[in-house]
């Protein structure tokens, strides 16, 4: 076996060990998210403090102790676990095939990794070039989490999570305030015992105060309300356009390309015997 093939084996094994470690991290993060709020309490505390401050400005005293982001991000957690298991299994195949130069394992590894690599490239192109397909898959789920939304005085976990998110990101609904139309528990007929006729949730007001006209029919406008600012696009831009996220995506694709290259090189230059580095 030539020098390039030996170097290739070393690179293949090292990169796959790194990918295997990454997969374990992804699985751990997914489990942490599902495990509940105690593990990521500092983030929830920040959301709760900001929400409490906004509620206080509106003269409201609402129990926010049951706030949880779990219901909103559980699908992300399951996706992380599933992806972690898949790439972990592939990385393990790469390590075994690279260490012992087992042809059949390397063939399976090249095919599986190649398919996964192409799928990721297609997804990245779709997400960054035309994200409509991605939107169509994610937005319906997010809108379903609004099913029990009950407004500014609600204490149910998803209601509190949405209030905290809309307050923190200065947005209203998934796409706009229209996402709240037709909900069974919204709009409320009264706030603090005073009759109201709300057009948007009160938390969507740009300025938090005891004057509720910024959210009522006839007086709510884009000047005093985030009614047309969707949370989905703000979160998408925050996450997908973040330099760290883009860097990680590029590095992962580059790692996989290098691993595919060396795995194919080894296959093309190997004999039929079993080697051990």
Image (cartoon, helix red, strand yellow):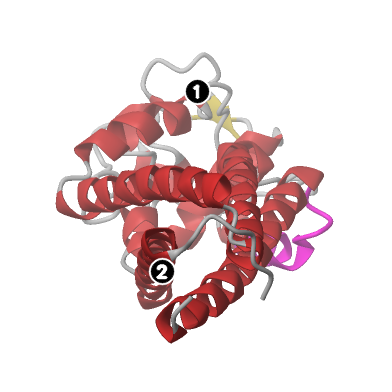
The residue lying at 31 percent from left, 67 percent from top is 241
The residue lying at 51 percent from left, 80 percent from top is 6
Decide: is 224 above or below 115: below
Identify the residue at the far bottom of this view: 3
Does label 2 or label 1 sit earlier along the sequence?
A: 1
Gap in Å between the C-alphas at discs 2 and 1? 58 Å
- On the question of residue 199 being in view, the answer is no
Disc on res. 186? 1
- On the question of residue 103 being in view, the answer is yes
Decide: is 122 above or below 254: above
The residue lying at 54 percent from left, 44 percent from top is 104
Residue 254 point in image, percent of width and height = 36, 70
* Mark 2 or 1, closer to the camera: 2
The residue lying at 41 percent from left, 43 percent from top is 111
Whether the magenta-drawn stretch holds residue 41 is answered as yes
Magenta residues, as a range? 36-50
Q: Is residue 168 shown left or right of residue 214?
A: right
């Amino acid at each position: 076996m030539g020098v390039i093939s030996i170097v290739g084996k070393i690179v293949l094994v090292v990169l796959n060990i790194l990918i295997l470690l990454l997969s374990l991290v992804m699985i751990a993060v997914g489990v942490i998210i599902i495990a509940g709020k105690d593990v990521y309490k500092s983030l929830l505390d920040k959301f709760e403090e900001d929400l409490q401050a906004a509620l206080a400005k509106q003269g409201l005293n609402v129990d926010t102790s049951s706030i949880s982001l779990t219901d909103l991000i559980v699908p992300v957690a399951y996706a992380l676990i599933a992806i972690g298991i898949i790439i972990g299994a592939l990385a393990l195949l790469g390590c075994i095939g690279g260490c012992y130069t087992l042809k059949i394992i390397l063939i399976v590894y090249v095919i599986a990794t190649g398919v996964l690599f192409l799928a990721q490239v297609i997804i990245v192109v779709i997400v960054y070039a035309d994200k409509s397909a991605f939107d169509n898959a994610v937005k319906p789920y997010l809108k379903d989490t609004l099913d029990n939304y009950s407004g500014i005085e609600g204490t149910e976990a998803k209601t509190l999570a949405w209030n905290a998110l809309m307050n923190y990101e200065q947005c209203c609904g998934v796409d706009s305030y229209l996402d709240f139309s037709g909900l069974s528990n919204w709009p409320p007929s009264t706030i603090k015992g005073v009759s109201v006729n709300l057009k948007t949730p009160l938390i969507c007001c740009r300025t938090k105060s005891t004057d509720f006209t910024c959210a009522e029919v006839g007086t709510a406008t884009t000047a005093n309300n985030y009614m047309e600012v969707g949370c989905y696009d703000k979160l998408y831009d925050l996450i997908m356009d973040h330099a760290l996220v883009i860097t990680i995506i590029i590095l992962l694709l580059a790692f996989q390309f290098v691993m595919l290259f060396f795995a194919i090189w080894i296959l093309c230059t190997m004999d039929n015997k079993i080697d051990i580095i």
